[in-house]
Amino acid sequence: MCLAIPGKVIGTYDQRGLRMAKVQFGGIVREACLEYVPETQVGEYVLVHVGFAISRIDEAEAERTYQALKDLDQLTELESPVVEEIAETDEPSYPAWMNAGDLRR
Amino acid sequence: MKYLDEYRNGDIAAKIVAEMRRIQTKPWVLMEVCGGQTHSIVKNGLDHLLPEGVELVHGPGCPVCVTPLEMIDKAHAIARSPNVIFCSFGDMLRVPGSDGDLFSIKSLGGDVRIVYSPLDCLKIARANPEKQVVFFAIGFETTAPANAMLAWRALEEQVNNLSLLVSHVLVPPALEAILSASGNRVQGFLGPGHVCAVMGYSEYDPISARYHVPIVITGFEPIDILEGTLMTIRQLEEGNAMVENQYSRILNRQGNLPAQQLIGKVFEIGDRKWRGIGSIPMSGYHLRDEFSGHDAEKLFDVAEIATLEPEVCISGQILRGIRKPHDCPAFGTLCTPQHPLGATMVSAEGACAAYYAYGRHLNPQGADKLHQIVPGPVPHDVSVKPREEREYSHASR
């Protein structure tokens, strides 16, 4: 469980003051925290470990590492259940999908 | 797929192995530190490709494996408490304690939840203000930034019904414990790639110098591991002992500085007990005093739990590279992934579980004897170019 999984940042947003992203891993999209790689932009690739991006990598490396992890059956953590954020009390509630793009402004 | 071939290319693997055979004059024992590397080695049979006399032994880098039994029993005691939501990474759920595992506690009505990210616990705690939410914060340095952020946010946002049961371990003190133990066989290390992506690798310099061992920070893909092994053998043959970085495409000497900063704010370093090895001085993270309101060990009365490990289990010696899974009479018989007796069988990344998963318990001769069926040495004139010059292009095949 010390391996980090590469994915593509497809959207960024703020969640209670934390810089977060939607990151695509193969066919699965999960939330990741970008606080440790704050300069990351949409379209870039990051290595994600337990929901935190720990380094930025290039596309070639991302694809290769992803496939290697798949071969080692090390992608199961991506299938963990999704926990939805409850509405922040001082803001209106948005459905989760609106966080994915730039829709939430 | 298009980028994949170069790191799985059999030609490159053959060249690296040929170069190992060319330069190797003495037997060497190397340890791969990370459980992900162990898994890759056993799955791909990389240890059988190495020249005879070069032996890979499997290190302690599996966090689930080295979490001590009494910590697991503490977790279970908390998870059984009324009014508690116990959150954990999925791998910990089937690790048996003295009495059952987290799955069995869940089936008996305990509120046990698998989380993907530690931050999920904040969401669960906010949604369940009348419950105590406890997160089982295990892991090596790779996981520490995530767990540190959880504690930091809990304090900052005053989420007072959230606490962490911390059992964090550190790689460098474990390497020192292995090197300084009597009966140590390890002469060089393949260092843990993703741990160093967070921490960098400067903290390995003093270990390499003090014990005169090469430490090569290595990835986990087959070619990475073979290349890391070659770099380590080269140092040993030349009498060198330094820290090198095979995995430079992922990490640099500094590591992730923002992550290290938050780890330092949340955790302090103290002694930590490792399953199978025992207590290692200054080998784990503990929550700093400011976070005591979020420290499950202080909030729950779980201090005095005595546990007993099965006597037959040799996982402690396996984790230190002294013995291999086949040396254990219980391996594959009394002890299986379904009924693990000790540390190295409880997680897929443990050496015993990896040997079992890839059928090595079926070979009574022991894995090392398979050398005999591997083709003989490749001619010595095949040389390996340094990484930058090597041709990785598809056109060359």
Image (tube, helix red, strand yellow):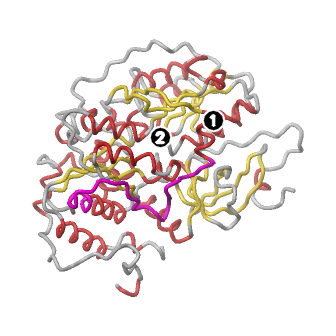
Q: Residue B337: where, in percent of width, then height?
A: 33, 39
> Is B64 colored magenta in this rendering?
no
> Is B238 colored magenta in this rendering?
yes
Write the residue at 30% across / 23% down.
B309
Q: Residue under label 2, please give it.
A: B140
Q: Residue B302: where, in percent of width, then height?
A: 51, 15
Q: Residue under label 1, please give it.
A: B265
The chain that hosts pointer 1 is B
Per the rendering, the mark at residue B365 is none
Residue farthest to the bottom, as pictured:
B395
Crowd rating for badge 1 (residues with CA inside 10 Å; few <14, some 14–19, many 20+): some
Q: Quadrant of the C terminus of chain B?
A: bottom left
Residue B356 shown left or right of residue B275 in the figure:
left
Crowd rating for badge 2 (residues with CA inside 10 Å; few <14, some 14–19, many 20+): many
- Decide: is A91 above or below B390: above
- Segment colored magenta: B233-258
Amino acid carrying mark 1 in the image: Lys
Residue B28 shown left or right of residue B107 in the figure:
left
Amino acid carrying mark 2 in the image: Phe
Q: Quadrant of residue B184?
A: top left
